[in-house]
Amino acid sequence: MPLFSKTALMGAVLALGQFSNAKQVINNVWYCDEVTKMQYQNVGCSGTYKTPSVMTDNSGQCVVNYAEQAYSGPLAPLNNQITFHLRGPLKLYNFAAYYIDNTPDDEDTPQTYGARAKREEVHEKNRRFDHRHHHEKRKVKTEVVEEVVTITRYADTPEPSSTIELTAAPSGVVANAYKSKSGKPKKPATGDLWKRVGFYDSGKQILEGATFLNNKGGQGSGTWTGCFGNSLSHMSADGQSGSPTPQILADNTLFGVNEEFSIWTNQSCDGTCGYSYGADTCYRGWDGDNKVFVFKFTMPPGHTDDSNIYGNSNMPAIWSLNSLIGRTQQYPSNKDWSCWDSGCGEFDIWEVLYPQAPACEFMTSTLHSAQGNPGTGKGGGGTCDYFKRPTDGTFTGMVSYLSDGTITIQKLADDWDFPEYLTTDDIKKGFSASMPSFKVAS
Ligand SMILES: *[C@@H]1O[C@H](CO)[C@@H](O)[C@H](O)[C@H]1NC(C)=O
């Protein structure tokens, strides 16, 4: 979801002149046609973003150091680890993550499925759940945080090098080491098999390869400081609070207006992810040049407060962020306290932007990155076409991030059964030259 003014965003998008078929404008956002699939093309640019490398609350003095991270390639910066964020009113029934299951050591190796065993050899980690006692349990209110900002001081960044040293992850935790010899991302081949590496089934209470987190650090896991507020926390099964350990989201849980949670892998970072404000809630995101995700959800109508149209009431959403954002500050009171503003990337998949009919029924998508709006990190662009929000029934939708620089969102059949394996053909079955598309400006 856009973290900053949508008006500014739309100004940028309108300047691209993409909306000749616009049908209606609601609160500065164009809505065109209802679609069941949508492809973003030409996704990926190169540049650097700035991310906190240390965040310390020294008795009220907020010290933040920064590091620069370079990115390039198709999808970049969303070829970094990404995480999924969901906001109510919403119920999640299923989630699945798929990765190509061949990890050829070199490009000429015939594709075999022997690599699968390798992948599963994730070495046992001793997760440390540091059960600290937090006496400060009160929530950070925006007003409080704003006071804190006035006393913020930035320490000089001591690092001589301007690039974060991200320690390479052990091969077992790089779910998608699917590169050619030259290090360039390979494009998925027709015969490739994709394995389900992350899975949630609410009814059967299955959770594999994934972790649910929320922003309640200080409640059993994560941390809270006056400077930065709540870090990430493990989410309780009812979705309402933090928890010392990872939990399986309970069946039929309704997230209400403004309630949010996120989906990560189950692999702890162990120093491979860069800085994390919550030390014991550092999980890897969904990495790689080719990655596919499926969600089954409903977004029942929420309370609509006419007086507060920007309050996220009745505005559910599912979006993806560079994982560094969640690990630092998803809603920073200072824009530099996450890498978002400097362009580490966001892709909104299904987002309601207005609480009233008819726009509350329209799920929109947008890319935020340095593309499409040179000089800023949050330009990107988006289509005015939208998906129909499921207020009664369910919606099963796939989003594929592929190394040809496309991100494709597709509505699937409602009885789609989250199989253990997919083929590239299954993923691309609905693609066609004539499908609705949006080419992101370079
Ligand atoms: C992650 O989940 C997979 C699938 O359920 C499991 O095999 C693996 O042991 C888990 N890894 C960790 C580090 O918990």
Image: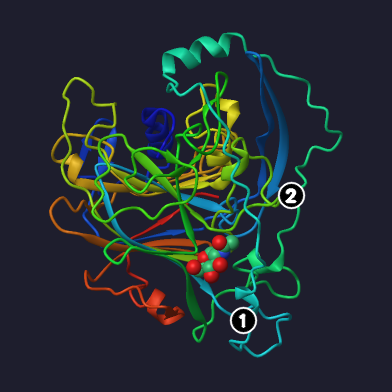
Looking at the picture, the colour scheme in use is rainbow
Which residue is located at x 31 percent, y 62 percent?
397
Quarter in which the N terminus is drawn: top left
Percent position of residue 199, x then y: 41, 66
Foreground residue among 307 and 326: 326
Task: Write down the quadrant of residue 416 in the picture.
Answer: bottom left
Percent position of residue 246, x then y: 47, 51
Left or right of 10 on screen, residue 274 = right
Which residue is located at x 41 percent, y 81 percent?
425
Inspect the image, locate mark 1, and give the three-letter code of the amino acid beneath it.
Answer: Ala
Mark 1–mark 2 distance (CA, rounded to whole Å): 26 Å
Left or right of 151 on screen, residue 429 = left
Secondary structure beneath dot 2 equals loop
Labels 1 & 2 near each other (Cβ < 8 A): no
Percent position of residue 25, x then y: 23, 36
Q: Which residue is mark 2?
A: 166
Residue 215, numbered circle:
none
* Count of number-bearing discs: 2
Inspect the image, locate mark 2, and give the three-letter code of the amino acid beneath it.
Answer: Leu
Ligand 1, by image quadrant, is bottom right
Foreground residue among 85 and 280: 280
Q: Which residue is mark 1?
A: 117
Foreground residue among 206 and 313: 206
